[in-house]
Amino acid sequence: MCGIVGILAERPVAGLLVDGLQRLEYRGYDSAGLATLVGDGIERRRAEGKLANLVERLVKEPLSGTVGIGHTRWATHGRPSEDNAHPHATELVAVVHNGIIENYRVLRMELEAKQYRFASETDTETIAQLLTDFLKQGMTPQQATAATLARLEGAFALGILFKGHNKLLIGARRGSPLAIGYGDGEMYLGSDALALAPLTNRITYLEEGDWAELHPGKAI
Ligand code: GLU
């Protein structure tokens, strides 16, 4: 299980996300990535190997956006590669995940039968596709999160962002820790309080089995 950072702010977050991921490097990882909301869509930068490779990618292709999620991956399902690096995304959501989704095969088969096409070998991508399926049925991000969590078996911490909702980040945990940090009008998610240390010392941990909506200045 590796590292998650999420930031909801009013300033560009890519550099802050990389700083947070650097603080989680001690845990070991095989690839890393970021996703932010830019304009009307989701943008990602991912790279296999060290964070320096991701930083090099970001220098060539900078990432703007004031809400974002970042991840360092320790592969459990699918080899270490850029395609399998998190965040996993569809046109509607991006997800970072620590842990394992035990029933991912069944979920993937169901979603493939509904014509959803997968771009990775990971268990995590089923979460992004499942959220998308619920959103396409007309659910709000909150409803889609609740419906998705009800289908997942296994251990996880999640950070999720939604296209068109640049004042919202969702975090969820079951069996893996996830911290919520409070800044001045900014909100943070971290798999480890250490990731958030330069940003805030006001931190709470999500309750086991719980999930939270982060809005500017508050978590509900
Ligand atoms: N099971 C996920 C994967 O293999 C997440 C691994 C992790 O916790 O970094 O992509």
Image (cartoon, rainbow, N blue to C red):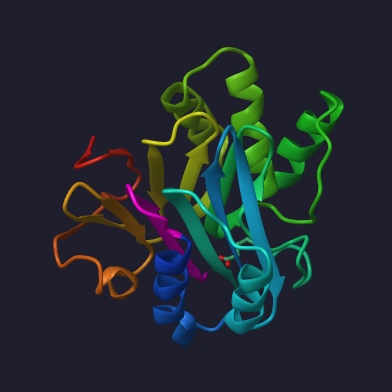
Question: Which residue is at the front of the view, 103 or 205?
Answer: 205
Q: Is residue 10 magenta?
A: yes
Q: Position of residue 65 (x, y in %)?
A: 48, 49
Question: Which residue is at the front of the view, 89 or 14?
Answer: 14
Q: Residue furthest top?
A: 138
Residue at x 52%, y 69% (from the top left corner):
1
Left or right: where does residue 76 sit relative to residue 117?
left
- Quadrant location, ligand no. 1: bottom right
Residue at x 40%, y 46% (from the top left corner):
172
Residue 90 vertical position relative to residue 195 in the rendered view, above or below: above
Residue 123 vertical position relative to residue 218 in the rendered view, above or below: below
Residue at x 77%, y 70% (from the top left corner):
81
Left or right: where does residue 86 sit relative to residue 18?
right
Question: Which residue is at the front of the view, 201 or 76?
Answer: 201
Question: Which residue is at the front of the view, 15 or 51?
Answer: 15
Residue 130 vertical position relative to residue 15 in the rendered view, above or below: above
Q: Position of residue 199 (x, y in %)?
A: 25, 67
Residue 41 appears anywhere in the view:
yes
Left or right: where does residue 99 sit relative to residue 11?
right
Give the total number of marks visible in the rendering.
Answer: 0
Q: Position of residue 188 (x, y in %)?
A: 31, 55
Residue at x 65%, y 78% (from the top left corner):
56
Q: Which residues are magenta?
A: 1-13
